Structures are given as structure tokens and as C-alpha cells.
Image (tube, rainbow, N blue to C red):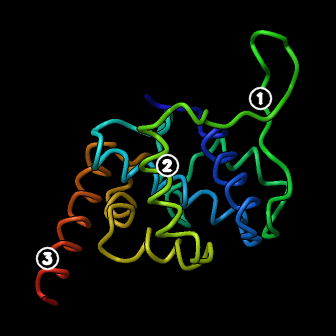
Amino acid sequence: MAHKPSWVANSFLARAREGGVKDVDHLKIQKLVYCLHGWTLATRNEPAVGEFFEAWPYGPVLSSLYHAFKKHGRKPIKTYAADVDPASGEVKAFRVGDEDNEFHEVFDEVWKKYKGLTGLQLSQLTHADGTLWWHARQRGDDYLDNADIRKHFVDLARQGREQAHESK
């Protein structure tokens, strides 16, 4: 099930606070959500977020997250993204519920794999020459296609398995 990007971002921010990770800035949150989306597509064949990533000059971006967190500039994000609660009408921060086991299985692995990287390091991974983002920019595409994102992350998994097999 696809989630609102703000809920996914808030889940990463909450995990960072719980674990004492203090470097989650605007760049890092975008790339964490992108990696989660890609690995969810690769392992579950469904999107993690219900919006399409755009091929911005500095990598894959969800414009809704950009607008939610742009006030932080390049500094670590100190506040959660807020949404209107449809039941009460009050504005509050939401995150993906703990009962969503399928989401959290992938989320936990993505967090373990990428939490130690800076936003700049994650950005270098997601928009180097030859990546999906790079090809989209070369073609002049505004958006990244979920099927292409899935294929890219499936290929990453395959490369990881091959490298692990070769090192044995």
C-alpha cells in the first residue's frame, strides 16, 4: 500500500530521533524516501509512496517533501511534516503505523543500510552517471517511472548477490 510521502518521511525522522541520528537534512530525507520506494518496488512490487519522483537537477525529489521541509534549508530537520487529520480537522504529524508489517520490514532494512550515509553521499548514489535519474535527465523526462525504479533496484540487488557470491 502506498503511503503519503510526509508519513514516510516522518517515520524516518522518528527513527532518527530514537537512534540519535542527528544529520537528517532535506537532502537525506529525500534520498531515504527514494531508496525505500525503490527497495519496496523491488521486493514487494508495489510503491512505498503514492506520488511520483521528479528528476530534479540534484536527483530524484518528491515535490511535496521539498515544500514540507524547505524551511530547514541545509540544516538538520527539527520538525515533522504536518497534515490535516480528516477525522478531527486538526493539523498534526502522522507516520506509518507500526501495524504495517510489510512496510516496516523494508523500512528497517533501508534504515540499517543507509542511516550512516550523509545526504550528500546518498545523493551521489542516486544521481551518478548511468543511474536511472541520469538517464531520465538525459532524455528530458520530468518524472521517474516506477517500473524503471523497480528495475534499477532489482539490478542493484542482483549485483549485490553476485558480488557476495564472488567473494566466497
For mark 3, give the secondary structure.
helix
Can you tell which of label 2 and label 3 is closer to the viewer?
A: 3
- What residue do we see at 39% from left, 61% from top? 133
5 up-or-down from 22: above or below: above
Quarter of the C terminus within the rendering: bottom left
The quarter holding residue 165 reads bottom left
SS category of the residue bearing label 2: strand
Measure how far apart labels 2 and 1 are at the Cα level: 22 Å
Give the Cα separation between the discs numbered 2 and 3: 30 Å
* Amino acid beneath label 3: Glu
Viewer-closest of 50 and 141: 50
Measured from the top left, where is residue 78 in percent x and y? Answer: 85, 57
**What residue is shown with label 3?**
162
Where residue 92 appears, x then y in whole percent? 84, 30
Give me the residue at 51% from left, 69% from top.
114
Q: Is residue 90 left or right of residue 85?
A: right
Residue hosting label 1: 83
